[in-house]
Image: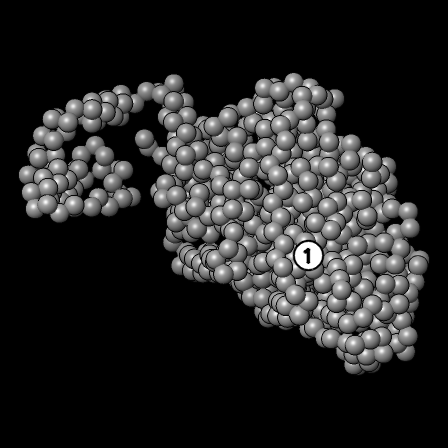
Amino acid sequence: MPIEQPAKIDQTLQDANLQLAIYSATGRLMAKRKDAISPDVCPDYQDLRTQANLVKKHTIENLDYYLEIVEKAVAARGGKVVYCRDATEVADFVLKLAKERDARLLVKSKSMTTEEIDLNERLEHHHLEAVETDLGEYILQLAHHKPYHIVAPALHLTRYDVADIFAEHLSAERETIPEKQTLMARVALREKFLAADIGITGANFVVADSGAVVVVENEGNARLTSSAPPIHIAIAGIEKLIPRAQDLAVFLRLLARSATGQPMTVYTSFLSGPRRGGETDGPDEFYLVLLDNGRSKLLADKGKRESLYCIRCGACLNHCPVYRKIGGHSYPWVYSGPIGAILSPQFMGVTHDPWLPFASTLCGACAEVCPVKIEIPRILLELRGEVVAAKTREKSNRWERLAFRLYAWAARHPSVWSAMGLAASAVAPDVPAMLNRGPIADWLSQRDLPPLPPKTFRQLWREREGTGVR
Amino acid sequence: MERDTILHRVRTALGRTANEAPAEPPPVYLRVPDWSLEERIRRFTEALEALGGRVYRAGGTAAVQEIVWEILAGRSAIVSADGLSGIPGVEGPYHDAARIREAASRVDAGITGAEYALAETGTLVLLAGPAEPRLISLLPPIHIAVVPVARLLANLDELLTKVPDPAAQTSAMVLITGPSRTADIEQILIRGVHGPGEVHVVLVDSETG
């Protein structure tokens, strides 16, 4: 099938500095994860994965039940659950609240869910100032870039890029030392935290029976976002629920170890409702926005529903040979890497970017490192089938279907298969050259066909049986 | 209404009906290692110092005051009611939100207690409450926590065994594991981004106060 890929892929492949940046950053994250799950420090890693998968499966399959539980629990703690079907409804809710409370300045901590709905752009359009406060996201917001990686959003930028961005937007001297750049951001953002009217965070987990959101981070910006302004809004996809606080023992361990190789992130905040009577500080109002945005549609597909188990650790990106070459901006949506390759077609429709499920070697590394055991390669295959079916409906590719039908017939008839094998091995050295001139030359321009062996597997097997070696 | 639409869509997708109770969730998975007090102290110290934090041991209140005095070395500080009083030059405890906020954003160090500490990961567990504001452990560049050794638990699993639902006790439980850090620029580790860049924990042998 002819596959149209974005030009961004070629650009990325040709940028040697960017290639090095992606390769070393993902490599470092891989090494750290490996240390953090090694049997001497995390002997029950595989049991934790199994448990996480079971808990997610149970919650997702009874999601309506847990949504109603969390709704009641949040209300009991003085907060309010706000359901939103899509991006517009989230923006409308925040805008309405901002107007009622006369709010002008919002601070935000890193949240993939709000990236998904372009919340900042929508708010800025209505003259509200929404400031990203995670260092990486802050740099990206100033430069108008999309996150490059789920956990390392500014992975594609060097300190020199950051120096240019800060010099332009903070009207400061050009500063190339990362420590000093970080201090500049701390000073600029501290002012925003203390002046902000509303703080918006995401949620790594929503604990149903506690009516609480759990936010993990390393910088302290999510703590400030949820503690300093008088209003805290947490925005979460409906799939983020877990039944009980005690389940966190499993999920927190897996998330930090899989994402950055830390045993625990620096800060884990467990937040339920606004400040209570007697407590000295914290927000006066708490809202939990539960966002659908296509998730309920995805739920209907039993075979692919598990895509919603994802806890956004980014391990599949780091381990993916494709992500490590084409980088985060080659993917069509905010979610990149293997998880992006299965989420985007399901959210946007398989015909939106039909190349995406094919941009995988199916090596299985993503499934092996997934802390909640999402079978990404299997889902990619299902999506490929859907793309092909959609294409067939559009314009059927007769030759390709004929070729596969012939292949299937030969594979079911051992004598034919064996004869074809013998014929192929007779002309073995010439086969790759022959194919390069044939109808699949295009396809082969991106792939190296290994040389055909001079003997078929069946021949080798017979010879082995003859010598008695197994 | 959005709520009903979403719940209806979810139920339809799952083939469930309203008010249909689910099967029991999988049993919780909690593993609490049996570590002696000395083992917990050793592990806590190792884990926190590996992250760039500092751990001290004090025999009693007088010793704690001396250690904190030395850490401060003349720098300004605010204390929470759960922290430690009686150190000259240290402000607080305050009970007024505006005053806490003003002082915490001005001084060099915030001195707090901690409800628990977790040995495996070098973690402090703070529960926001009348005696423990959220901002004292967050705004100043230095955080000093005074923790009785009896509060030293083995790990997160033990914490969640003792506190199965943190929401029952506080609007905000925060687990603090080392100094604030980032690696967002070229994966270079930098401490003290938005939260404290220094974390000092004084383990006290006997309960104070």
Q: Is residue A426 above or below residue B198?
A: above
Q: Nearer the viewer, residue A351 or A313?
A: A313
Rendered view: A12 above or below A394 = below
Q: Type of residue at label 1?
A: Tyr
Residue carrying label 1:
A267
Quarter of the view holding residue A264: bottom right
Q: Quadrant of residue A293?
A: top right
Residue B153: x and y, percent? 70, 60
Q: Which residue shows up at 58% across the image and 23% down it? A: B14
Q: Position of residue B70 (x, y in %)?
A: 78, 81
Picture residue at 45% right of the left edge, 28% below the top: A351
- The percent position of residue B65, horizontal first and vertical second, equals 84, 77
In the foreground, A468 or A83: A468
- Picture coordinates of residue B76, whole percent (x, y): 84, 74
- Report the side of B209 relative to A67 (left or right): right
Indicate left or right for A179 with B58 as reference.
Answer: left
Work out whether residue A421 can be spotted: yes
Q: In this picture, is B115 found above or below B63?
A: above
Q: Secondary structure at mark 1?
A: strand
Task: Tell me the residue at 52%/56% (across/down).
Answer: A42
Residue visible at 58% across and 62% down? B183
Figure disc tally:
1
Position of residue A457 in the picture relative to residue A367 (left or right): left
Image quarter of the C terminus of chain A: top left
Q: Residues within 10 Å of mark 1 (few under 14, many from 20)?
A: many
Which chain hosts label 1? A
What's the image's color scheme?
one colour
Q: Is residue A328 visible?
A: no
Q: Quadrant of the N terminus of chain A?
A: top left
Residue B179, relative to residue A462: is it above or below? Answer: below
